[in-house]
Image (tube, rainbow, N blue to C red):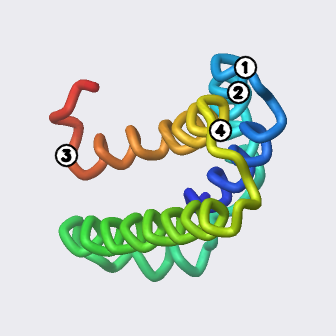
Amino acid sequence: MYLTIHTSVSLVIGSQIQNPVLAFVLSFLAHFALDCVPHDSKKMHNWLSNKTPDQKNKIFFFLASADFVLIFILLAALYLTDNITFNASLIAAVVSGILPDVLWGINSLTKGKNKL
């Protein structure tokens, strides 16, 4: 699932929960709850099946980069329009909401050489 979806849900959690630790935990758990929703496209898997591992890594890197740019735009828009108050709970929720995918992406791109 794209990070923008996880970020959006994390923003809701972080804006409603004032305890940063609780917001972190709930957003982390929400990440996995969202991942339980079927969202893999068979067309995308079929399209990627004939790509080399290097090509797949480049495509993955491009999509992840675009996703981070969209997250930045979303957060900047919310900040500039004063529609949300950025506090420790909100930041903790957003970080934990995308953390599992960021760690998975690092592991995937480094081919498991990173033991983090």
- Name the amino acid, label 2: Ala
* Local secondary structure at mark 3: loop
Q: Are marks 1 and 2 in contact (CB under 8 Å)?
A: yes
Mark 2 lies on residue: 23
Indicate which disc residue 19 carries: 1
| Residue 68 location, quadrant | bottom left
Indicate which disc residue 75 carries: none
Depth-wise, is mark 2 or mark 3 nearer the camera? 2
Q: CA distance from mark 1 to mark 2?
A: 6 Å
Using a 10 Å C-alpha cutoff, classify the residue at mark 4 as few (fewer than 14 neighbours), some (14 to 19) or many (20 or more). Answer: many
Indicate which disc residue 90 carries: 4
Disc on the earlier residue, 3 or 1: 1
In which quadrant of the rendered image does the C terminus lie? top left
Horizontal side of residue 17 vs 1, given as left or right: right
Residue 56 spot, x, y in % from top left: 30, 70
In front of the other: 77 or 47: 77
Disc on the earlier residue, 2 or 3: 2
Disc on the earlier residue, 4 or 3: 4
Q: CA distance from mark 2 to mark 4?
A: 7 Å
* Local secondary structure at mark 1: loop
- Name the amino acid, label 4: Leu
Q: Does 33 appear above or below 71? A: above
Q: Are marks 3 and 1 in contact (CB under 8 Å)?
A: no
Q: CA distance from mark 3 to mark 1?
A: 34 Å
Q: Are marks 2 and 4 in contact (CB under 8 Å)?
A: yes
Depth-wise, is mark 4 or mark 3 nearer the camera? 4
Residue 80 spot, x, y in % from top left: 61, 67
Mark 3 lies on residue: 110
